[in-house]
Amino acid sequence: NSRQQQLDIIDQFHVLEHGGEVLMQNPDTIVWVFEDIGRKMPATAVPKQVYYTREVHLSAMHKTVLTYDLKRRPYLGTTSMPSQLSFLMANMAGVNPHTLVIDCFCGTASLLVAAAYLRAHCWGVEIDP
Protein backbone atom coordinates (compact mmCIF):
# COMPACT_ATOMS: atom_id res chain seq x y z
CA ASN A 1 0.00 0.00 0.00
CA SER A 2 1.10 3.55 -0.68
CA ARG A 3 1.49 6.01 2.19
CA GLN A 4 -1.82 7.65 1.25
CA GLN A 5 -3.58 4.27 1.21
CA GLN A 6 -2.13 3.54 4.66
CA LEU A 7 -3.40 6.87 5.99
CA ASP A 8 -6.83 6.19 4.46
CA ILE A 9 -6.96 2.85 6.29
CA ILE A 10 -5.92 4.55 9.55
CA ASP A 11 -8.69 7.13 9.11
CA GLN A 12 -11.25 4.31 9.02
CA PHE A 13 -10.46 3.63 12.67
CA HIS A 14 -11.15 7.18 13.91
CA VAL A 15 -14.03 5.86 16.03
CA LEU A 16 -11.49 4.16 18.33
CA GLU A 17 -10.35 7.61 19.55
CA HIS A 18 -6.62 6.99 20.01
CA GLY A 19 -5.83 10.67 20.34
CA GLY A 20 -2.60 12.29 19.27
CA GLU A 21 -1.08 12.38 15.84
CA VAL A 22 -0.13 9.44 13.65
CA LEU A 23 3.65 9.01 13.45
CA MET A 24 4.66 6.74 10.59
CA GLN A 25 8.37 7.03 11.54
CA ASN A 26 9.39 5.99 15.11
CA PRO A 27 5.84 5.48 16.43
CA ASP A 28 5.10 5.06 20.15
CA THR A 29 2.53 2.39 19.36
CA ILE A 30 2.48 -0.01 16.44
CA VAL A 31 -0.86 -1.25 15.15
CA TRP A 32 -1.51 -3.89 12.54
CA VAL A 33 -4.49 -4.06 10.21
CA PHE A 34 -5.18 -7.40 8.53
CA GLU A 35 -7.73 -7.52 5.74
CA ASP A 36 -9.19 -10.90 4.81
CA ILE A 37 -10.25 -10.74 1.18
CA GLY A 38 -10.49 -14.52 0.76
CA ARG A 39 -8.55 -16.92 -1.40
CA LYS A 40 -7.72 -16.23 -5.02
CA MET A 41 -9.32 -12.80 -4.92
CA PRO A 42 -7.77 -9.71 -6.54
CA ALA A 43 -6.01 -7.33 -4.17
CA THR A 44 -8.68 -4.72 -4.91
CA ALA A 45 -11.50 -6.93 -3.54
CA VAL A 46 -13.55 -5.63 -0.63
CA PRO A 47 -12.38 -7.36 2.58
CA LYS A 48 -14.73 -9.90 4.15
CA GLN A 49 -13.23 -9.20 7.58
CA VAL A 50 -10.82 -6.59 8.98
CA TYR A 51 -8.67 -7.29 12.05
CA TYR A 52 -7.10 -4.45 14.03
CA THR A 53 -4.52 -5.13 16.73
CA ARG A 54 -1.82 -3.37 18.73
CA GLU A 55 1.67 -4.82 18.71
CA VAL A 56 2.92 -5.80 22.13
CA HIS A 57 6.66 -6.06 22.48
CA LEU A 58 9.42 -5.41 24.95
CA SER A 59 11.85 -3.39 22.86
CA ALA A 60 11.30 -0.27 24.97
CA MET A 61 12.08 -2.30 28.10
CA HIS A 62 14.84 -4.44 26.58
CA LYS A 63 17.53 -3.19 28.97
CA THR A 64 15.28 -3.73 31.99
CA VAL A 65 14.36 -7.24 30.86
CA LEU A 66 18.04 -8.10 30.48
CA THR A 67 18.73 -6.76 33.98
CA TYR A 68 16.24 -9.27 35.43
CA ASP A 69 17.17 -12.10 33.05
CA LEU A 70 17.11 -15.56 34.62
CA LYS A 71 20.84 -15.96 33.97
CA ARG A 72 21.51 -13.05 36.34
CA ARG A 73 19.25 -14.28 39.14
CA PRO A 74 20.93 -15.80 42.22
CA TYR A 75 18.32 -18.56 42.57
CA LEU A 76 16.34 -20.51 39.97
CA GLY A 77 13.72 -23.17 40.35
CA THR A 78 12.68 -25.79 37.84
CA THR A 79 9.72 -23.66 36.78
CA SER A 80 11.19 -20.13 36.83
CA MET A 81 9.37 -17.93 34.33
CA PRO A 82 11.62 -16.03 31.88
CA SER A 83 11.77 -12.29 32.53
CA GLN A 84 10.41 -11.52 29.04
CA LEU A 85 7.17 -13.38 29.83
CA SER A 86 6.94 -11.88 33.32
CA PHE A 87 7.17 -8.32 32.01
CA LEU A 88 4.77 -9.13 29.17
CA MET A 89 2.21 -10.53 31.64
CA ALA A 90 2.57 -7.52 33.94
CA ASN A 91 2.15 -5.20 30.95
CA MET A 92 -0.94 -7.04 29.69
CA ALA A 93 -2.45 -6.93 33.19
CA GLY A 94 -1.98 -3.16 33.31
CA VAL A 95 0.21 -3.26 36.42
CA ASN A 96 1.05 0.20 37.75
CA PRO A 97 2.04 1.79 41.09
CA HIS A 98 -1.54 1.49 42.37
CA THR A 99 -1.93 -2.21 41.57
CA LEU A 100 -1.96 -5.02 44.12
CA VAL A 101 -0.44 -8.18 42.63
CA ILE A 102 -1.00 -11.43 44.52
CA ASP A 103 0.74 -14.53 43.20
CA CYS A 104 -0.56 -17.58 45.06
CA PHE A 105 2.00 -19.90 43.45
CA CYS A 106 4.94 -17.52 43.20
CA GLY A 107 7.80 -20.05 43.10
CA THR A 108 10.92 -17.97 42.44
CA ALA A 109 8.75 -14.84 42.10
CA SER A 110 9.45 -13.97 38.46
CA LEU A 111 6.06 -12.32 38.00
CA LEU A 112 6.42 -10.44 41.28
CA VAL A 113 9.87 -9.16 40.26
CA ALA A 114 8.34 -7.62 37.12
CA ALA A 115 5.37 -6.20 39.05
CA ALA A 116 7.67 -4.78 41.74
CA TYR A 117 9.77 -3.10 39.05
CA LEU A 118 6.55 -1.40 37.89
CA ARG A 119 6.11 -0.28 41.53
CA ALA A 120 3.08 -2.43 42.29
CA HIS A 121 2.33 -3.72 45.78
CA CYS A 122 3.28 -7.41 45.67
CA TRP A 123 2.32 -10.41 47.79
CA GLY A 124 3.58 -13.90 47.11
CA VAL A 125 2.67 -17.27 48.60
CA GLU A 126 4.60 -20.48 48.06
CA ILE A 127 4.00 -23.85 49.73
CA ASP A 128 7.66 -24.87 49.38
CA PRO A 129 9.72 -21.67 49.82
Image (cartoon, rainbow, N blue to C red):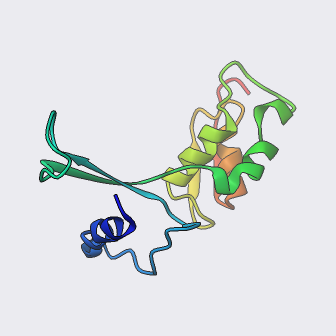
Expressed as whole percent of the image width and height from the top left, the position of residue 123 reads: 64, 48
Q: Relative to 90, is 10 above or below? A: below
Q: Is residue 78 above or below residue 34?
A: above
Q: Residue at x 56, y 58 (%)?
A: 95
Q: Residue furthest top?
A: 78
Image quarter (top left, top right, bottom left or bottom right) of the N terminus:
bottom left
For residue 11, which quarter of the picture? Answer: bottom left
Q: Is residue 125 left or right of residue 19?
A: right
Residue 38 located left or right of residue 121: left
Q: Nearer the viewer, residue 74 or 1?
A: 1
Compared across the picture, whether 110 is left or right of 10 comes to right
Q: Quadrant of residue 79?
A: top right
Q: Quadrant of residue 14?
A: bottom left
Task: Please name the residue shown 35% across and 65% down the image.
Answer: 6
Q: Residue at x 64, y 59 (%)?
A: 120
Where residue 129 appears, as percent x and y from the top left, is 74, 27
Q: Residue 20: percent from the left, percent from the top? A: 45, 81
Tally the marks. 0
Q: Is residue 64 left or right of residue 44?
A: right
In this rendered view, identify the residue nearer to me: 74 or 6. 6
Is residue 124 in view from this perspective?
Answer: no
Residue 66: percent from left, percent from top: 78, 43
Task: Give me the residue at 12% from left, 53% from top.
Answer: 46
**Residue 111 in view, yes or no:** yes
The one nearer the camera, 15 or 7, is 7
